[in-house]
């Protein structure tokens, strides 16, 4: 027997010692005074998790690592077997060739097949529909509705039974909302929703149904017949009854690293090379009371923004010196990692997040007026790939820093999301904010929005954040549905932020947008090819909003600025030393307000654009995204720095 004081490693395997038992044994060693570092090595295989593994303050100085990176899987799902070839009969009598298996449980809403999330059947198969009527016709933001009415021609292909058993999903503003239907009256075509809408539904809310038998039949779709406990699946190419690996999740979280308080934290824990997979995506939005509807708690169909109340596959609270290195989060339901109050020195490095129901990493601690031990700070999110997320909750962010400071988000590749890439700050307006000193740099963010939601940014900031720097990020191909496809977005009250040496192009709205704020410095960036103005400030305020200097602006015909006459007359935007060019060589329109257009000379006459010039910056190949400056570029003579973002994104 090895003396306790010589134990340096523990082995676990799918058919032997479990990870929970190894952690319990390590806790016993700590209680007996054995304090040397211990590595728990996990053999290859799948480890089913039905209840989250709990890491408590009793365990410290532990590394959990895979013997073979990527081959050790903590799985929150159970595998469904017994599939056979079958025919699914739609309500109209048509038949669909598919696979079918019986299931014991019907409480799941996520299905993962051979490493990919299966799709719900959907009506309409593409696009969306408009409601005929909603309960609350107010345009106020929080004017919620509990019932909706459908147009007769829109729902003609669906039976009343199918509508009553479907999930109603609708998109508006910057959120997607999802609810079961409590009751449906086919005579009035009115559905009472089990979950109340979070926002008003008169602001261009468009809907679709999920889980309806009439449209089941596309490749990689599933349909659950709850009454008969049968699961149907239309296989992808190469999948059949003899090789299908289909998982239905039972666990929402796999690991909870939670201290008892700020005074009793979990410390010095590292996970390396572990795969986390197959978790649930269903959750109730925060229970809140509504004065208009009495004091009873109500359940909303979404969070107000960013899926901000959702937990993670891994949840961290009251912890320090925690690391996740080279791990993989795949086929998961909500956020990958959720870092909460009282956490510091947390590192997420070299990880992959893909096929997520919500986002990648969410960070949130105590707000500005909370006790300092509850603050969350010094979180490092670096060299990760976050892609193909928002597959269940579209309004999720790739990385979300809510109340946090002195964090670094760098060298991440974030792509294929429906909302914001990186979000920082959680204070609207000029209220006190705990956020400061965050660094967001060298990230490659693209293919964001995809025309689904509105009001988003490649990088989105909110509230005052002194000392926060957003620099050397490559952001492109941002597309909103109605409005607000922005690359850099300083929203309500953003202040004292420096945004520099970023390259932003191909946006459906502005490359840079500020709702309102103060004393933000935007310098030495390249902004090109916007759907509206290159840069816009929405609200006029009687103070200096932005220092906009030494930027290169390339327009293919859109105005350079979206600013009011008041901004120009009062000098609330200090713009100087910029190089401006319109493709084709025409004179750029600097701003347009109604029928009035401002030329470059008009701006100079107003005292703006001192030291600026209209000239071709001479990029290598801007049309194809190569914004390197040629040696003869006039930008270099003006003192504008070269921007080298060849190293942006994850370094693998």
Image (spheres, rainbow, N blue to C red):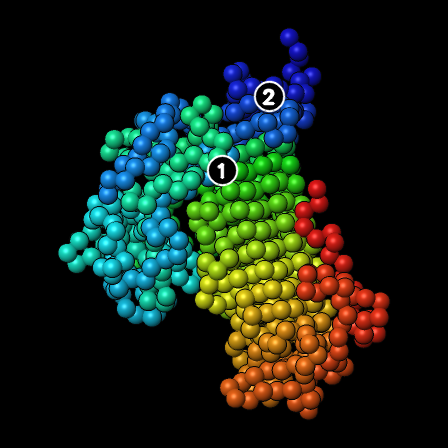
Q: Is residue 529 above or below residue 541?
A: above
Q: How many numbered circles does the render carry? A: 2
Residue extending farthest to the front is 94
Q: Which residue is mark 1?
A: 116
| Image quadrant where one finds the N terminus | top right
Q: Secondary structure at mark 1?
A: strand
Front position in the image: 161 or 469: 161
Residue at x-position 60% and y-position 21%:
43
| Residue count near mark 2 (Cα–Cα under 10 Å), binned few <14, some 14–19, many ≥20 | many
Front position in the image: 82 or 95: 95
Q: Is residue 493 left or right of residue 626?
A: left
Q: Quadrant of residue 17?
A: top right
Residue extending farthest to the left is 187
Mark with earlier residue (1, 2): 2
Residue at x-position 56% and y-position 19%:
13
Residue extending farthest to the top is 1
- Residue 79 appears at what percent x and percent y? 43, 26
Residue at x-position 40% and y-position 24%:
81
Answer whether labels 1 and 2 touch (C-beta < 8 Å): no
Q: Which residue is mark 2?
A: 43
Q: Is residue 449 above or below residue 272?
A: below
């Amino acid at each position: 027997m090895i003396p306790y004081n010589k134990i340096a490693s523990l082995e676990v395997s799918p058919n032997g010692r479990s990870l929970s038992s190894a952690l319990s044994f390590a806790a016993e060693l700590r209680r007996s005074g054995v304090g040397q570092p211990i590595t728990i090595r996990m053999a290859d295989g799948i480890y089913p998790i039905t209840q989250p593994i709990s890491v408590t303050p009793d365990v410290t100085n532990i590394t959990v690592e895979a013997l073979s990176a990527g081959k050790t899987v903590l799985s929150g799902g159970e595998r469904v077997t017994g599939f056979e070839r079958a025919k699914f009969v739609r309500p109209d009598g048509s038949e669909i060739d598919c696979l079918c298996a019986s299931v014991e449980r019907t409480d799941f809403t996520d299905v993962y097949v051979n490493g990919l999330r299966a799709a719900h059947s959907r009506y309409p198969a593409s696009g969306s529909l408009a409601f005929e009527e909603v309960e609350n016709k107010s345009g106020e933001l929080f004017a919620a509705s509990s019932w909706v009415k459908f147009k007769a021609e829109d729902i003609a292909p669906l039976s009343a039974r199918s509508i009553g058993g479907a999930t109603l999903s609708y998109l508006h503003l910057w959120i997607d909302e999802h609810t079961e239907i409590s009751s449906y009256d086919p005579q009035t075509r009115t559905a009472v929703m089990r979950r109340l809408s979070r926002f008003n539904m008169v602001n261009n809310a468009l809907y679709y149904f999920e889980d309806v038998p009439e449209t089941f039949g596309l490749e990689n779709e599933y349909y659950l017949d709850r009454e008969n406990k049968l699961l149907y699946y239309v296989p992808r190419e190469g999948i059949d009854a003899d090789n299908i690996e289909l998982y239905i999740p039972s666990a929402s979280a796999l690991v909870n690293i939670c201290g008892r308080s700020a005074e009793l934290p979990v410390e010095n824990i590292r996970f390396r090379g572990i795969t986390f997979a197959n978790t649930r995506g269903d959750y109730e939005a925060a229970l809140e009371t509504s004065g208009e509807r009495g004091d009873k708690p109500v359940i909303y169909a979404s969070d107000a923004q960013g899926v901000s109340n959702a937990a993670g596959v891994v949840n961290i609270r009251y912890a320090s010196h925690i690391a996740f290195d080279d791990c993989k989060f795949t086929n998961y339901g909500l956020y990958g990692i959720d870092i909460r109050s009282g956490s510091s020195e947390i590192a997420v490095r070299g990880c992959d997040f893909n096929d997520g129901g919500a986002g990648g990493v969410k960070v949130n601690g105590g707000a500005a007026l909370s006790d300092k031990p509850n603050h969350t700070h010094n979180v490092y999110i670096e060299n990760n790939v976050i892609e193909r997320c928002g597959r269940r909750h579209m309004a999720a962010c790739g990385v979300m820093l809510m109340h946090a400071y002195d964090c670094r988000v760098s060298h991440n590749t974030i792509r294929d999301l429906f909302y914001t890439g990186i979000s920082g700050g959680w204070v609207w307006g000029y209220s006190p904010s705990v956020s400061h000193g965050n660094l967001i740099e060298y990230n490659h963010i693209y293919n964001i929005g995809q025309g689904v939601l509105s009001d988003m940014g490649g990088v989105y900031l909110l509230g005052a954040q002194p000392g926060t720097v957003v620099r050397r990020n490559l952001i492109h191909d941002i597309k909103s549905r109605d409005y607000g496809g922005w690359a850099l977005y300083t929203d309500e009250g953003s202040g004292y932020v420096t945004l520099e040496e970023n390259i932003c192009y191909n946006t459906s709205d502005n490359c840079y947008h500020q709702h309102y704020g103060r004393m933000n410095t935007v310098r030495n960036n390249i902004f090109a090819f916007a759907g509206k103005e290159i840069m816009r400030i929405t609200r006029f305020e009687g103070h200096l909003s932005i220092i906009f200097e030494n930027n290169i602006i390339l327009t293919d015909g859109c105005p350079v600025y979206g600013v009011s006459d008041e901004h120009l007359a009062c000098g609330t935007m200090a713009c100087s030393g910029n190089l401006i060019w319109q493709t084709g060589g025409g004179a750029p329109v600097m701003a347009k307000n109604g029928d009035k257009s401002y030329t470059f000379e008009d701006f100079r006459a107003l005292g703006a654009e001192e030291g600026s010039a209209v000239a071709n910056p001479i990029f290598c190949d801007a049309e194809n995204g190569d914004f390197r400056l040629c040696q003869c570029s006039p930008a270099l003579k003006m003192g504008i720095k070269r921007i080298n973002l060849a190293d942006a994104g994850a370094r693998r």
